[in-house]
Image: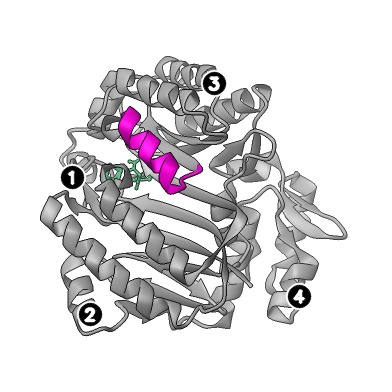
Amino acid sequence: MSISLYVHFPFCTNKCHYCDFYKEVHDKSHEEKFYDALAVELELAVEKTADRTLSTIFIGGGTPSLTNLDLFEKFIAQVKEYFTFAPNLEFSLECNPESINLEVLTRLKEIGVTRPTFGLQSFNDDTLKVLGRDHNVHQSQQAIYLTNALGFKTYGVDLIFGVPKQSSKMFSADVEQLIDLDPPHISFYQLIFEKNTPLYTKFLNKRISPLDDDLILAMYKSGCEKFKDAGYVRYEICSFAKPYQECRHNISYWDGSDYLGLGPSAHSFIDGVRFYNCSSLAEYHIAINKRELPREIDESGRDERIAEAIMLGLRTEWGVNKKKFEKRFGSDLFDYLNQDQIDMMLKSGHLIVDDDKIKLTDEGFFIIDSVTERLVK
Ligand SMILES: C[S@@+](CC[C@H](N)C(=O)[O-])C[C@H]1O[C@@H](n2cnc3c(N)ncnc32)[C@H](O)[C@@H]1O
Ligand code: SF4
């Protein structure tokens, strides 16, 4: 049976104003200690996932492109000792443009990375400043130029929209510049004002105002249209790919496949059970020093699993497949959906129900949160 591997690299040089992913300021000695602990976590975790073939690896963060490449290479060699790598292994690694140069990308490719992804976010230096990013537009273009020059067959780019002070014109210029670069994959994220971030504090202090909801929706619709015209398929609410360039790792999260997560704050889903690693490097080290896995089991029950599967499925272009649902949960999908709402949404053109699946229409995607809330019992 196959499995995916996620590794959370918990260091960044800079803390962007909007981000609440778990990370610490990068420090060489802390990184060395982290890799020592990661090797132990891998050894402990593998006892429970023996004899699996790795179909995808995703190194996320944090800023994995900052990593000490010798330590990273050693870690990947350890992973190879425990798992068989699938012949078509997809191996993604998140990169920040300012930490990318010819030497780093060349080494990453040699180590086996097949799919770098780049957090470019915007092609407007003012927008990058509002976000508190550590790179400029020139560094973004340089990173993509090097990726093409080195012959990576696939790669991804992240773009954020709905940033305070961003006008429709600035947004359109971002989308057009991204399309000009022609990346095989685009992650198109609406900026979320996460609590406990400097951006949120600025909002509370009235030093920054979020954009109007209608403008944000107009940006999403316009992005979807322009990406479609440029040959991309939206296969998930935020994910757009040229044909056959979908991120298989992310699909494994949405379709209920097994994945093992290593590193602080990483999640795992194995044999129907979800685990959460602690979001603190200090606690992570304490557990690993005792040779314990730094994880807690998600105690939520079957009903929560079912609601989650429906919500994740509705986020995708494939929707929720009736037969797969029945095979996984042993129940009829419609037992968990509100029939009155289905009828209303069919009439209003937000939902499609056919012999195989239920899925959202374009109009449904534009109001996905309220649609899913109303549909799931
Ligand atoms: C957590 S980052 C890790 C990768 C890398 N350090 C980077 O910044 O691209 C992964 C993606 O999540 C996005 N992200 C983080 N916080 C976000 C937020 N509050 N709203 C929207 N996107 C967010 C980042 O911009 C980035 O594209
Ligand atoms: S967005 Fe990326 S670079 Fe910025 S703080 Fe978050 S993880 Fe670090």
Ligand 2 - quadrant of the structure image: top left
Q: Would you call the spot at circle 1 few (<14 residues within 10 Å), some (14-19), or many (20 or more)?
A: some
Question: CA–CA distance between discs 4 and 3?
Answer: 40 Å
Q: Would you call the spot at circle 4 few (<14 residues within 10 Å), some (14-19), or many (20 or more)?
A: few
The residue at which mark 2 appears reads as 287
Q: Nearer the viewer, residue 17 or 233?
A: 233
Q: Which of 338 and 249 is in front in this view?
A: 249
Which region is colored magenta? 101-114
Some atom of ligand 2 lies within 8 Å of the CB belonging to the residue at label 2: no
Question: Residue 46: x percent and y percent?
Answer: 44, 77
State if disc 2 and disc 1 touch (CB < 8 Å): no
Mark 2 or 4: the one toward you: 2
Q: Would you call the spot at circle 3 few (<14 residues within 10 Å), some (14-19), or many (20 or more)?
A: some
Secondary structure category for the residue under label 4: helix
Along the horizontal axis of the image, is 93 left or right of 69? right
Question: Residue 312: x percent and y percent?
Answer: 59, 59
Mark 4 or 3: the one toward you: 3
State if disc 4 and disc 1 touch (CB < 8 Å): no
Instruction: Judge whether 44 appears above or below 108 on screen.
Output: below
State if disc 3 and disc 2 touch (CB < 8 Å): no
Residue 42 visible to an observer of this rendering: yes
* Quarter of the view holding residue 294: bottom left
State whether the magenta stretch is mostly helix, strand or loop. Answer: helix
Question: Residue 98: x percent and y percent?
Answer: 27, 30
State if disc 4 and disc 2 touch (CB < 8 Å): no
Mark 3 or 1: the one toward you: 3
The residue at which mark 4 appears reads as 326
The residue at which mark 3 appears reads as 179
Which amino acid does the dot numbered 3 rest on? Ile
| Of the image marks 1 and 2, the number of the one nearer the N terminus | 1
Some atom of ligand 1 lies within 8 Å of the CB belonging to the residue at label 4: no
Question: CA–CA distance between discs 2 and 3?
Answer: 45 Å
